Amino acid sequence: MLTKFLIPIASDDVAPRFDLAVEVHIVTCLTGGEMETKTVVLPQASAEKLCHLILTESITCVICGAIEEEYFQFLSWKKITVIDAVAGPWEKALLHHLKGELTSGAILCHRTVEGCHVDCS
Amino acid sequence: MPIPSPAITHLLSSELSFNQLLDEIPLATAVLDRDLHIVWLNRAFEALTGFSRRDALGVPCRHIVRGRICVENCPARGKTLDSPVPCESDMITRDRFRLPIKLTLSPLTDTHGDLTGYVETIEDLRAVRELDNKKNQAFSFEGIIGRSQEMEKIFQTLPLLAQSDVSILITGETGTGKDVVAEAIHQTSHRTGGPFIKVNCGALPETLLESELFGHAKGAFTGAVASKPGRFRMAHNGTLFLTEVGDLPLALQVKLLTFLDDQVIYPLGDTRPFHANVRIIAATHRNLEQMVASGTFRQDLLFRLNVARVHLPPLRERRGDIRILLDHFLAIYRTKLGKGIRGFSREALTRLTHYRFTGNVRELRNIVEFSASMATDPIIGVENLPAYLLESVPNTCPEAMGPVRPMGAEPPLPPHQTWATTEREMILKALEESRGKRQLAARRLGWGRSTLWRKIKHYGIDAS
């Protein structure tokens, strides 16, 4: 089965809220290791419509920001992997996931305070 | 590695721990830099959002607060704040719970008045919302809203009437909610498990009405190819709601009278009686006493229907309910339309509270639906109200808008203009301007061709 990811986005970042995202990236991992990306713009932000899109597109994994428990449980019940509370650039999140390093709650944004990098490790 | 806590000096004689000071504040508080990246947050903030200080340090606050306001309309985006901005919104916690919140963003300035960052506070509004719900429930009965004296009396009477099995006559002007009251009585009565059947006596011709109400046997008349049970039989063990009972023809009034006496119906062409256990609720906007005097309504039927009477006052006689009804319908359409509308502007409220709602609650509901559909901002302004509301001059004194207003002052446009009618008009205009070319019309309306096609079909427009 093809691995298909859906990432709700807000510009270059993973959208902070699943239910308020109006743009999503659908990334398909092809057999040769290549990836095919398409962008879907939704007419209106809606968690229900997004869930419907996830099911109709046969998505296998969702990488998102904040998601309500109701939708998280629904998608999990439909056997879709949901990695939530991810903050940061969507491409970085996808790369982390492909390397098997992405976990729920991962903060991947560049941490700065007054323009200077801060280290929390 | 623990994040070092800064110290506050010169405030007291000894140094103060900034961390401790902030943690003592029971309100979720965070300090942000100019770019809205989190610099510091207190324990209450950690508890509310579910993110620790370490998780949040240096991260844009929208990824930690995850509020609707942060995504849709961040108060600091593209503008400089010079005073605290409070806004009501919702957020999703790390535990995936959606909470109603009040978020306040206050600018921090240095000694020269230059912006150095922000203080963000978040209040959890769950308790307030629950209280609001309870407060609103206190002014309602099964979906009927009001807090005026007249409505309070009705709220006290309805549960008592619901528990009895007497026939009820509901009177009141059009749009006052007679149907809603009838259904509420049924829902709270012991017949709630049974059917609630509604018949509009004014909507069917006399010949059809008899078979519609009482049913007919197979072969009773030409075209009666099968037996029909009739509304009385369908309402068995439930409630039959006869709306516009004033329009019931005299011949049928006699039949209804017979049923009220014996609880037995004789379907057309059938010799076998049917004992129907049905409660009758009737409603009319007509003055039945006057109709009795003019000989168009049977007095004995009036006596039998009028065992208990509920009179619904027009909205102009309970002006205090306008605000609560506006809020009620706005909450409904906010959810239905999926818009983040917070309320009405002061001017719009003045217009609405001083308007004479001739169509009563129905007209008010339509106005709210129209305004909510038209609004592009979180606050509904005067420009979003139907045009006929803007053309009538608002009266500054509500008492002056008494029931006797001259006919000339009535709104010039039909009061029941809804979003649906407006949308239909928009489609027709676009089609006319594009000379029937759907592609062009869709572009004018900012829709896709398929959306336009769907809507044309929905409104039954002949665009050929």
Image (cartoon, coloured by chain):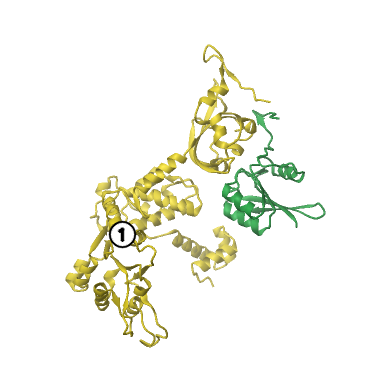
Label 1: which secondary element: helix
- The relative height of residue B295 versus residue B374 in the rendered view (above or below) is below
- The relative height of residue B237 versus residue B121 in the rendered view (above or below) is below
Left or right of A38? Residue B81 is left
> Most extreme residue toward the left, as rendered?
B293
- The relative height of residue B405 versus residue B12 in the rendered view (above or below) is below
Residue B250, position as x, y percentages in the image: 24, 76
Residue A82, position as x, y percentages in the image: 66, 48
Chain letter, colour yellow in render = B
**In front here: B261 or B90?**
B261
Would you say residue B318 is visible in this rendering? Answer: yes
Q: Quadrant of residue B249?
A: bottom left
Q: Which residue is denoted by mark 1 in the rendering?
A: B162
Q: Amino acid under label 1?
A: Ala
- The relative height of residue B86 versus residue B372 in the rendered view (above or below) is above
Would you say residue A42 is visible in this rendering? Answer: no
**Rendering colour (chain A):** green
Residue A15, position as x, y percentages in the image: 63, 44
Left or right of B223? Residue B50 is right
Q: Residues within 10 Å of mark 1 (few under 14, many from 20)?
A: many
